[in-house]
Image (spheres, grey):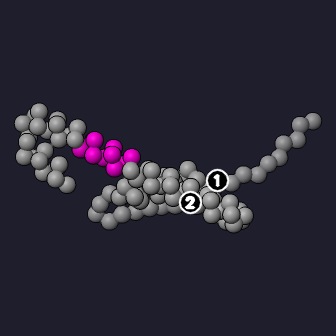
Amino acid sequence: MLDVSGAGSVGGIEVVISNNKGHSVEKVAKMAADRILYIADDAPLPIRDQARAFKNTVEETLVYYMRQAVEQDRATICAKLRQSGYSDLADNLRSL
């Protein structure tokens, strides 16, 4: 006879909203870092402190590379707009 038992948890659900804009790079980086790294509240203090420091480093790294991605995407869109004859629109977009 086979007897299987177990328990599981799906974790918490967080809803993040913004008003009249998209999320900032910093907010998305924090959401990603929270998803990548979970730090247990009952972890020993030295481990928790080290994990928080590492999480902050991960978040800062994500912010840096996400900003790079945004800049490169804008550069690509501006180049496509200029190729299509929309230089003024490209200039406006680039100045954002």
Q: Nearer the viewer, mark 1 or mark 2?
A: 2
Question: Crowding near pointer 1: few (<14 within 10 Å), some, many (20+)?
Answer: few
**Front-lying residue, 73 or 59:** 59
Q: Is 20 within the magenta?
A: no
Which residue corresponds to the image point at 93% horizontal and 36% vertical from the top-left?
A: 1
Q: Is residue 78 above or below residue 45?
A: above
Mark 1, secondary structure of its residue: loop
Q: Is residue 1 left or right of residue 30?
A: right
- In x, y percent, where is residue 21? 29, 60
Whether residue 49 appears in this view of the structure is yes
- Most extreme residue toward the top, as rendered? 83
Q: What's the magenta bit mostly, secondary-structure-wise?
A: helix
Which residue corresponds to the image point at 69% horizontal and 66% vertical from the top-left?
A: 45
Q: Is residue 59 left or right of residue 92?
A: right
**Front-lying residue, 62 or 14:** 62
Q: CA distance from mark 1 to mark 2?
A: 26 Å
Total residue callouts: 2
The span picked out in magenta is: 65-74
Q: Is residue 53 above or below residue 75?
A: below
- Most extreme residue toward the right, as rendered? 1
Which mark, residue 10? 1
Which mark, residue 53? 2
Q: Amino acid at mark 2?
A: Ala
Which mark, residue 80? none
- In x, y percent, where is residue 47? 68, 60
- In x, y percent, where is residue 56? 51, 58
Q: Is residue 32 left or right of residue 67?
A: right
- In x, y percent, where is residue 87? 8, 42
| Residue 25, quarter of the rendered image | bottom left
Question: Crowding near pointer 2: few (<14 within 10 Å), some, many (20+)?
Answer: few
Quadrant of the drawing holding the C terminus: bottom left
